[in-house]
Image: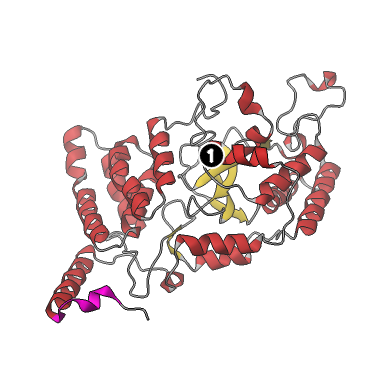
Amino acid sequence: MRFNVAQLLPISTRRRRRRRRDKRKKMTGRAKRKLKSSQESGTGNGELKKARTDESKAMPLSEVDSKQRDEMVQLYKLQMPEDLYHFWDLCKELCPDSPRVGPSLPPALRSGQCDGALKDTLGLQLVGPFDILAGAHKNSKNPQPNFHIHWRYLYDPPEFQTILLGSEDSQHHIGYYRDSPDSLPSFVGENEAKKGCTITQMGGNVFAAVLLYLLRRRKERGSKKAGGEALERLEAQLRDRAETLGLSLEQKTKGMKQRDKKVVTKTFHGAGIVVPVDKNDVGYRELPETDAGLKKILKAIAEARNDEERVKAFGPLQEMITFVQFANDECDYGMGYELGMDLFCYGSHYFHKVIRQLLPMAYSLLKRNLFGEILEAHLSSRSHDNLDQLSAH
């Protein structure tokens, strides 16, 4: 039989706690309305992991051996989804000589060698986990590569892990998004770091994401333009392999729709965050500012003309940090998570100190400590440049 320990407390104590909690919630203003979908309760990390695992339960194992899989976990400290390994198998079939990146020789001297499995057709380069599968880390020019920040762009939160590179001009990249480090990815998303922090969902696996990218590419080029036949062949291969593996090619899978119901707030990056919320609505508390209001506060701080102005502009933010401390005391860990993530997404170095106060604490309280480690490493070398940890640093 289940019981609540709080019920053993005297009635007067319980009433006093309830009044204090209601008062503090009133102080924070509840300015942003909670998403309807977030009313579902009991969304812990374990349920996230179970939901994502169930989707791929019937998928056969790829040809990638256990030694490579173990090495991947050792270097990234993250479990990779099976679709990543199957995609690597396909890329090796498409370009046996060099599936990850093409040779440095000019096209006229390649003797039929392909320029990476996806480079010629889509302009995409396999990176991140694929570097390990290709053994590139064994010949690294950097004696101590940190895979926490390997191809981690300026706006990539700890939840995001880059696996494909697109346009260098916009710093377009595609990656897995996890809600918890001990769960498999919730979806594959994309970001253009030169344009901002927005993460756009592309599908539930890398096959769906690459197919979506291909269809967009074809629409931009026009079906009769050069390279159209190559795109058609690649599309057929992607669809065929995904069907064989039982992978959904929808941009919004059933699992992603289920996740949407657990998202408590979208945050500045738009992909949303998930935290456990119990039947008593404990777990998340809204910020006392709308997104627009918070951005206005942050802009005043980042663009202050001098230190005196900046200190004054920090006032409203400092008040919110106090509210976060109240929320943490009462197990509403999602509030600090949201504020810390919004500050991170804003991108200004003026907020790094506050981010270090808020996000590692939120990750610790949510038992997502690895994300805190990734964040610390990223903030120590946050930049638009020098993102390849395998090159000389």
Q: Position of residue 66 (x, y in %)?
A: 67, 42
In this view, 390 is above or below 321: above
| Residue at image point 59% right, 60% down | 52
Closest to the observer: 356 or 119? 356
| Residue at image point 35% right, 68% down | 33
In this view, 298 is above or below 271: above
Q: Secondary structure at mark 1?
A: helix
Q: Position of residue 122 (x, y in %)?
A: 73, 40
Q: Is residue 8 magenta?
A: yes
| Residue at image point 42% right, 68% down | 35
Range of magenta residues? 4-11
Q: Position of residue 132 (x, y in %)?
A: 63, 33
| Residue at image point 58% right, 50% down | 189
Closest to the observer: 241 or 294? 241
Q: Which residue is mark 1?
A: 76
The amino acid marked with disc number 1 is Tyr
Q: Position of residue 292 (x, y in %)?
A: 35, 55
What's the coloring here? secondary structure
Report the residue that reaches farthest toward the front: 1
Counting every numbered tag in the picture gives 1
Q: Is residue 67 left or right of residue 358?
A: right
